[in-house]
Each structure stands twice: as C-alpha cells, then as structure tokens.
Image (cartoon, helix red, strand yellow):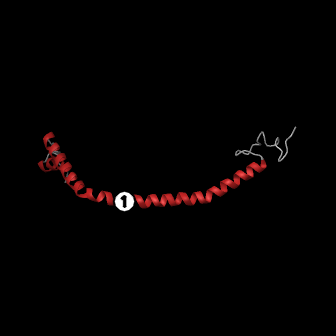
Amino acid sequence: MPLHTDSPQYLDVHTHSSTSPAELIFEISEFAAGLGIFLMALFPLAVPLIAMLVIPLMLVGLLGGLALTVVCAPVMLLRTIIRRARGTTAAGELRPDAGSRSVGRSVR
C-alpha cells in the first residue's frame, strides 16, 4: 500500500509545531531555576570535596617530584663532573679553556 503524504495522520506526525519566544523563555527560566536549586543544595559539599580530592593529588605530585629530584640530582651532578673532567660542554664540544689550565701551577 503506497504511503500518502497528503493524509492528515502523516502531517500530524511529521509537522513541527512552532514554539513562541515567550514559551521558549519560560522553559529556559524553569530549567535555570531547577539547576540553581540543585547547585545550591550541593554547594555545602563543595569545600569538603575539594579538600578530599585536591589535597591528596597535590601530595602525590609533591612526593613524585621529591622522588624524581632524589633520583635525578645525583645523575646530573655525576654528568657535570664527568663533562668537566673531559673538558667538554653539554653539547659534547671541546671547551675553549679546557687545555689552557694546568692544575696547581700557573703557566707563564
């Protein structure tokens, strides 16, 4: 059976009813009021939730940074000592003043 687009049943299902601007503003204001009531009820819980979530994350970050510092500082110090002993820069180039110094004596 072919579908007749002129039938009233088809038009009722697929036509869009236009909403007036006043109805739209009324719906938005109802939604905003409901959201405001919901948020005001949750507001007293905001500070404890922040304390329970943010403070532990800060502690984890600080402990991670401290652990990283404890591991990386000796490695960086050792690399610097080795570079100075070889007379090279961080890029591996020979320092200009590396061969001109003698240890313990002055060159004339």
Quadrant assignment, res 16: top left
Q: Which residue is drawn at 32% across and 57% down?
A: 47
Residue ranking furthest to the left: 8
Lateral position of residue 78 relative to residue 25, left or right: right
The answer to which of 28 and 89 lies nearer the viewer is: 89
* Towards the viewer: 1 or 46: 46
Residue for badge 1: 51
Query: Residue reaching furthest right?
Result: 108
The type of residue carrying mark 1 is: Ala
* Residue 103 located left or right of residue 15: right
Q: Which residue is drawn at 61% across and 60% down?
A: 71
Q: Residue at x 62, y 56 (%)?
A: 72
Q: For mark 1, does the 10 Å Cα neighbourhood hold few (<14), some (14 to 19), or many (20 or more) residues? A: few
Would you say 89 lies left or right of 65 here? right
**Element marked by disc 1:** helix
Residue 20 position, x and y percent, is 14, 41
- Is residue 32 visible in the rendered image? The answer is yes
Please provide percent x and percent y for residue 26.
Answer: 14, 45
Please report the residue visible at 38 percent of the width from the left and 60 percent of the height from the top: 53
**Which quadrant of the view contains residue 25?**
top left
Q: Is residue 46 above or below residue 104?
A: below
Count of numbered badges drawn on the protein: 1
From the viewer's side, name the closer residue of 35 and 74.
74
Q: Can residue 3 be seen in this view?
A: no
Give the percent coordinates (x, y) of residue 80: 70, 51
Q: In which quarter of the image is the C terminus?
A: top right
Q: Quadrant of the N terminus?
A: bottom left
Instruction: Left or right? Give the position of 62 relative to 17.
Output: right
